[in-house]
């Protein structure tokens, strides 16, 4: 999700000192580690905790502020030290090692039938490992195209909709059409290129990871996997319609250029709308568009929803599950989603009128919810090492033109399978 892309912010507080300090026996009730960081989101989370405590004085919850930037290492330390929070806010792509390591409680039987039915099966799939559920997915973030409406209108460009999206070739043609002088049609902020590439590639049928009958995962890189990488590479290297300088940027880094007309379009996570609203000049006319579609108008994207889990060491799992179910009631999901500028996962929550307004692109994002699927790497053990040591440098070099498509494939597949093999013996 957005957890590693947005958080060069004040949310990266001194949370590293919070988890180890919460030793067992030194608190009453349950501890809830929250990674909310935007002011609206923090307020919503704290308000819900206060409402729970008022209604359940015998099962009080303590709010513990964490940070997305360091949560994995903090949790690992707290799990191994027997000091983990009872209820844990994280993202589904961070759960695999903790689930397989026995640190998280199996929620399959703990969750109510009402909760199971509230969230679509493909949502539960994001937090299911070896047939067991280890997290409740509650917020999700599609990738969108933020566009300068004035520049698109001046170029006579058709605005895509979820019903009639751009194809990837059409998107490339639009970017070229919008490139004039020192202004680029698109900026690709790809400081962290892997999740963006793999998740968008679902629209073209790309899977990359393939699980065999023996349960082992191998990497295969075919034409469907290469459509999106080739599009980005060609925009930067061959067509000059994408700014090379943005490849090493975060999404936030591209916003000043977007506001100044240097980039007509920027593919970003849905939550970036909040920063645009806060930072853009008052007369800046922008629009939220769906990401390009694959063959047949396929708009599928991979997502790694934010999740709520329960520590295996939690001594009051039923109470913790009751608190989790309170947080993810449809009306509460809507509050949390609006606070974080994200989409809820529950079907009833997605139907809320507040998420179907045209303002700030809410309706466009909500219309994409039905097309969101588990990220391809969701349950792959060894993915973090493959991503950091193999895929990130390989994609960065390919997008900049330093290596060609054959080199990219070799590194992703040959080097990648050697990494994954160590985790699947």
Image: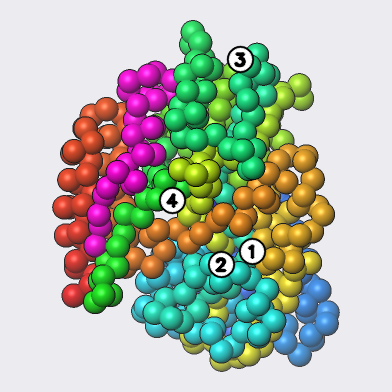
Q: Is residue 405 visible?
A: yes
Q: Which residues are magenta?
A: 218-245
Q: Earlier in the sequence, mark 2 or mark 3?
A: 2
In the displayed structure, 359 sits above or below 303; it is above
- Is disc 1 in contact with disc 2, using a CB cutoff of under 8 Å? yes
Q: Is residue 330 left or right of residue 26?
A: right
Residue to which mark 1 is pinned: 345
Structural distance between the alpha carbons of marks 1 and 2: 7 Å
Q: CA distance from mark 2 to mark 4?
A: 16 Å
Taking the magenta stretch, the answer to whether it contains residue 244 is yes
Which residue is drawn at the image coordinates 36% and 55% (left, top)? 207
Q: Foreground mark, 1 or 3?
A: 3
Mark nearest the camera among 4 and 1 is 4
Query: Mark 2 sits on what residue?
Result: 123
Lower sequence index among marks 1 and 2: 2
The image's mark for residue 202 is 4
Magenta stretch contains residue 21: no
Residue at left offset 71%, top offset 41%: 361
Residue 17 percent coordinates (x, y): 51, 65
């Amino acid at each position: 999700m957005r957890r590693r892309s947005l958080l060069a912010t004040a949310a990266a507080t001194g949370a590293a000192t919070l988890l180890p300090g919460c030793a067992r026996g030194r608190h009453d009730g349950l501890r809830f580690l929250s990674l909310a960081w935007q002011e609206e989101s923090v307020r919503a989370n704290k308000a819900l905790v206060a409402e729970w405590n008022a209604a359940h004085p015998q099962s009080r919850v303590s709010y513990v502020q964490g940070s997305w930037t360091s949560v994995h290492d903090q949790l690992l330390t707290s799990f191994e030290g027997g000091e983990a929070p009872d209820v844990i806010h994280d993202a589904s792509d961070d759960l695999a090692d903790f689930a397989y390591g026995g640190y998280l409680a199996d929620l399959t039987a703990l969750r109510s039938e009402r909760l199971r039915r509230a969230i679509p099966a493909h949502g539960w799939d994001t937090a299911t490992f070896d047939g067991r559920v280890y997290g409740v997915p509650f917020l999700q973030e599609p990738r969108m195209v933020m566009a300068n409406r004035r520049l698109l209108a001046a170029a006579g460009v058709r605005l895509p909709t979820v019903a009639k999206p751009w194809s990837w070739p059409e998107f490339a043609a639009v970017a070229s059409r919008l490139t004039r002088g020192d202004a680029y049609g698109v900026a690709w902020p790809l400081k962290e290129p892997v999740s963006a590439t793999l998740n968008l590639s679902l629209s073209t049928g790309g899977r990359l990871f393939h699980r065999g009958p023996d349960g082992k995962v191998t990497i295969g890189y075919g034409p469907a996997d290469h459509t999106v990488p080739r599009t980005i590479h060609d925009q930067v290297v061959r067509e000059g319609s994408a700014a090379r300088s943005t490849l090493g940027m975060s999404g936030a880094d591209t916003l000043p250029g977007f506001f100044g007309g240097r980039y007509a379009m920027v593919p970003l996570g849905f939550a970036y709308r909040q920063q645009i609203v806060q930072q853009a000049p008052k007369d800046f006319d922008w629009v939220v568009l769906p990401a390009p579609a694959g063959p047949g108008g396929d708009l599928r994207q991979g997502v790694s929803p934010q999740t709520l889990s329960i520590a295996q060491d939690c001594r009051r799992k039923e109470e913790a599950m009751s608190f989790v179910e309170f947080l993810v009631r449809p009306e509460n999901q809507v509050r949390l989603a609006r606070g974080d500028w994200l989409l809820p996962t529950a079907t009833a929550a997605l139907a809320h009128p507040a998420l179907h307004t045209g303002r700030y692109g809410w309706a466009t994002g909500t219309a994409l919810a039905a097309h969101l699927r588990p990220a391809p790497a969701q349950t792959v053990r060894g993915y973090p090492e493959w991503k950091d040591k193999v895929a990130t440098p390989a994609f960065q070099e390919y997008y900049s033109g330093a290596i060609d498509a054959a080199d990219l494939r070799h590194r992703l597949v040959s080097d990648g399978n050697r990494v994954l093999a160590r985790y699947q013996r």
